Amino acid sequence: MAWWYELRGAENRLVAMQRGFATEREAQEAADRAERTMRSLAYPRQMEDLTVVTGDDEKPKAKAKAAN
């Protein structure tokens, strides 16, 4: 089973995604790193909230959390 993450912006706009993680934890940690990178580079003034979505190939969009 392969896990994945997506970063979503306003109006569910896809900002970033990556697939192929062995575990949910790996996907979540990679998503957290990607979110921090986006915030420091592209969103320094926190122009919009980002949402992290993780899931696996069998259960799409299994979990979401709003980013601060």
Image (cartoon, helix red, strand yellow):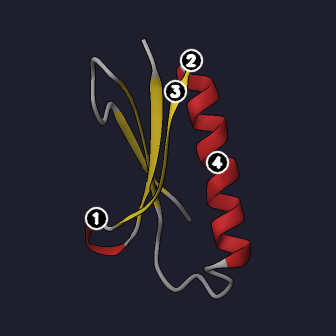
User: Which tag, 1 or 2, sits closer to the chain's start?
Assistant: 1
Residue 68 position, x and y percent, is: 56, 65
Res. 51 image quadrant:
bottom left
Q: Is residue 11 above or below residue 35?
A: below
Label 4 sits on residue: 32
Q: Residue furthest top?
A: 1
Q: Is residue 36 above or below residue 55?
A: below
Label 3 element class:
strand
Residue displayed at 58% across by 82% down: 46
How far is disc 4 from disc 1 in space, using C-alphas? 18 Å
User: Which tag, 3 or 4, sits closer to the chain's start?
Assistant: 3
Residue 15 position, x and y percent, is: 45, 64
Looking at the rendered image, the disc whose residue lies closer to the viewer, 1 or 3, is: 3
Q: Are marks 1 and 2 in contact (CB under 8 Å)?
A: no
User: What's the amino acid at mark 4?
Assistant: Asp
Label 2 sits on residue: 23
Looking at the rendered image, the disc whose residue lies closer to the viewer, 2 or 3, is: 3
Q: Is residue 35 above or below residue 39?
A: above
Q: Are marks 4 and 1 in contact (CB under 8 Å)?
A: no
User: What's the amino acid at mark 2?
Assistant: Thr
Label 2 element class:
loop
User: What's the amino acid at mark 3?
Assistant: Gly
Residue displayed at 57% across by 32% down: 27
Label 1 element class:
helix
Label 1 sits on residue: 12
User: What's the amino acid at mark 1?
Assistant: Asn
Residue placed most toward the observer, 52 or 68: 52
Q: Is residue 67 left or right of residue 39?
A: left
Residue displayed at 27% across by 22% down: 59
